[in-house]
Image (spheres, helix red, strand yellow):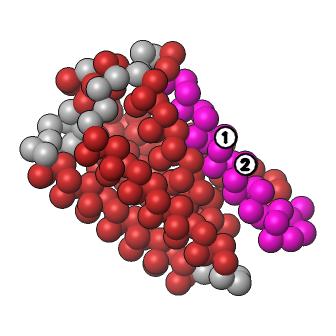
């Protein structure tokens, strides 16, 4: 049961708009459908989505939600879990990803992490955040040729890619802040 349906609907709407922006950007760069979302890769996206949402949002929120005594505590929980989620992506450095790509991914992951955390706090639906996380990974897989071109590993992050990713991060973080300011 979703506790706050208005936040759930607006969260899905924001998510869809940001992903449409991704798709349009990929189309304009000629990268649409240049990735390789094979069935095994799609299954791995599902496993990653379940694992990351469980570890970085579902378990911490469920553990600490009863202990939250103020809005400040809630904000601290969101910031902590989002920062941990972002920093978790440092593991990509060990698989050979470039430093610049990893930093960009950390920023984006932290911001979308805040978005998912607030969405989970407001709606109480773990399924919603897992499905949105999975959808983002699959959609990104359809237009991410960077793996094929070696950009992730070479350090050649294009300016347009930086602008798109940071724009998305700002949108996700902005909505998380707006939802936090609303009373439950």
Query: Which disc, if any, is residue 84?
Result: 1
| SS of the residue under disc 1 | helix
Q: What secondary structure do most residues of the magenta stretch adopt?
A: helix
Q: Residue at x 61, y 35 (%)?
A: 87
Quick check: 8 above or below 67? below
In-front residue for pair 1/4: 4
Quick check: 70 above or below 47? below
Q: Residue at x 14, y 42 (%)?
A: 31
Q: How many marks?
A: 2
Q: Residues within 10 Å of mark 2 (few under 14, many from 20)?
A: some
Q: Where in the figure is residue 144, as x and y percent of width and height? A: 25, 38
| SS of the residue under disc 2 | helix
Residue 146 visible within the image? yes
Q: Is residue 90 magenta?
A: yes
Residue 142 visible within the image? no
Quick check: 40 above or below 51? above
Residue 80 as seen in the image, left or right of residue 105? right
Query: Mark 2 and mark 1 in contact (Cβ < 8 Å)?
Result: yes
Q: Residue at x 53, y 61 (%)?
A: 173
Quadrant assignment for the N terminus: bottom right
Query: Which disc, if any, is residue 80?
Result: 2
Q: Where in the figure is residue 86, as x and y percent of width and height? A: 58, 40
Q: Where in the figure is residue 9, as x and y percent of width and height? A: 46, 78
Quick check: 91 above or below 158? above
Q: Quadrant of residue 38?
A: top left
Q: Residues within 10 Å of mark 1 (few under 14, many from 20)?
A: some
Using the numbered discs, state the Cα–Cα distance from disc 1 to disc 2 in whole angstroms: 6 Å
Q: Quadrant of residue 55?
A: top right
Q: Is residue 143 magenta?
A: no
Residue 4 as seen in the image, left or right of residue 144? right
Q: Residue at x 21, y 24 (%)?
A: 148
Residue extent of the magenta highlight: 66-92
């Amino acid at each position: 049961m979703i506790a706050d349906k208005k936040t759930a609907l607006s969260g899905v709407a924001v998510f869809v708009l940001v992903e449409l922006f991704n798709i349009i950007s990929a189309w304009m760069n000629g990268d649409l459908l240049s990735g390789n979302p094979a069935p095994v890769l799609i299954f791995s996206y599902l496993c990653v989505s379940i694992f990351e949402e469980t570890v970085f949002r579902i378990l911490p929120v469920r553990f600490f939600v009863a202990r939250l005594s103020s809005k400040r505590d809630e904000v601290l929980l969101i910031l902590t879990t989002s920062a941990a989620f972002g920093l978790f992506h440092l593991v990509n450095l060990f698989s050979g990803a470039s430093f610049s790509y990893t930093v960009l991914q950390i920023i984006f992951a932290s911001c979308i992490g805040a978005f998912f955390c607030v969405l989970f706090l407001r709606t109480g639906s773990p399924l919603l955040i897992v499905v949105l996380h999975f959808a983002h990974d699959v959609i990104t897989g359809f237009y991410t040729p960077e793996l094929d071109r070696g950009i992730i590993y070479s350090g050649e992050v294009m300016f347009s890619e930086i602008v798109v990713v940071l724009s998305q991060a700002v949108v996700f973080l902005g909505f998380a802040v707006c939802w936090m300011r609303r009373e439950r």
